[in-house]
Image (spheres, rainbow, N blue to C red):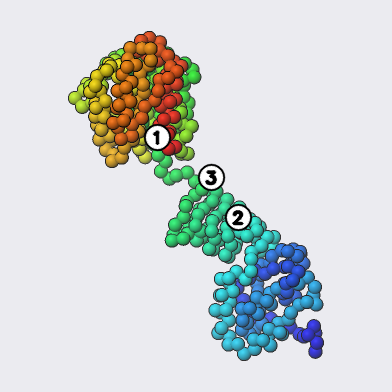
Amino acid sequence: MRRSEERTPPMMKKSSVKVFSSCRPTSRILDAMRPRCDKLGPGAELFAGEVRRAGIATPAYHFRHSLQIAPRRDEVTTMTEMNRTTRGTPRFLLLPILCIIAASGCGESGAGGEDDNTGGAGSGTGGATTGSTSAGTGGGATTGSTSAGTGGDATGSASAGTGGDATGGTASVSSGAGTGGAPSANPTFHIFMLMGQSNMAGVADKQDSDKNSDERLKVLGGCNQPAGQWNLANPPLSDCPGEKGWNLSTSVDPGIWFGKTLLGKLPEGDTIGLVATAESGESINTFISGGSHHQMILNKIAKAKTAENARFAGIIFHQGESDNGQSSWPGKVVQLYNEVKAAWGVDYDVPFILGELPAGGCCSGHNNLVHQAADMLPMGYWISQQGTNVMDQYHFDHASVVIMGTRYGEKMIEALKW
């Protein structure tokens, strides 16, 4: 009987192995697999979900070869050839051989099979892949993959891509959810202290442009708002009239523009809290231990630190007119920082940003001490008053309040590396 007339032995039972095979023109496969390749066309890849085998043990290299396919029927290699080659091979060898085939993937995963995946080397839409590079858009589970793509889940992946979740990657490490993933389970409430005297409390009249409607920006108390609770931040932020009674209720302060600037870089899901303690016309001595406003500062910190997910993040400070030129002032600024940090009970340093006093007013000569104090602090910075104007000999006009507040925010963003 000629080779082309040899009869294929009857199929005995199904194998549980899932095998990839090619529909390339140079390939060969059993007749039973031809219809799928005919449908897909040359160059496609075939996933054999139900591989049948003869009732004999088949070495891996012959088993794999027996699942190749050619476009022409007369090129089919029959199972009889395999039977001749492998007759006498013990049955108990079949299981480990098939396991080896499954682990190796029996070829590449391709694009476009009925049971395979769309997406080239990775798993495609809705499919499942063994040994692929990545899970494609909306793909199913991938064993041994490198990464999960958009919306895919990867088992054993090193990282998760956009919107994906990674489970049990190398050494059980995953990079977590990527861009578009679920928000953090514990978003941070970044709390900043606004400290100083009248140029921090604000003197220039507020305008409509100063209003804030973003719920991510809060103030503890605030002028004409319920004390002791977090309210939507709007100017002025410090209590009015305050403990001394000089704080205005109609003014704009740099703190609101500081907060608005931070919003542009605020991590997704997080919130900003402002704690304003400015008192117009007061010396730094009133803010440090033993001073008349020190307890007010401690009380506000005690309340602020109880907020859920609160993190003390930094201080902006505008003060010095009442201590103009006093050489002890920089040391007292450092003392104030240390006392505030101790009240928060943190073991890390935060940015402390000082603002220069306005040029053309009473006290621009004090700015050398502003720079000196910044140098003495562990995370000290200062911002320039260049380009600002005063409305009297002490206070910034409205446009200058906006400039200084924005500069405070930009410097804080830089210091926090947001």
Q: Is residue 369 left or right of residue 112?
A: left
Mark number, residue 361 = none
Count the labels in the image: 3
Residue 236, position as x, y percentages in the image: 39, 20
Residue 85, position as x, y percentages in the image: 67, 86
Would you say residue 50 is visible in this rendering?
yes
- Choose the circle earlier in sequence order: 1 or 3: 3
Residue 222, position as x, y percentages in the image: 36, 23
Residue type at tag 1: Ala
How far is disc 1 from disc 2 in space, using C-alphas? 39 Å
Q: Quadrant of residue 354?
A: top left
Q: Quadrant of residue 191?
A: top left
**Residue 59 sits above or below residue 237 on the image:** below
Decide: marks 2, 3 in contact (CB < 8 A)? Answer: no
Q: Secondary structure at mark 2?
A: loop
- Residue labelled with disc 3: 180
- Choose the circle earlier in sequence order: 1 or 2: 2
Q: Quadrant of residue 310?
A: top left
409 vs 378, nearest the viewer: 378
In the image, farthest residue toward the left: 290
Residue type at tag 3: Gly
Mark number, residue 415 = 1
Within 10 Å of the Cα at label 3, are there few (<14), some (14-19), or many (20+) other Cα atoms? few
- Choose the circle earlier in sequence order: 2 or 3: 2
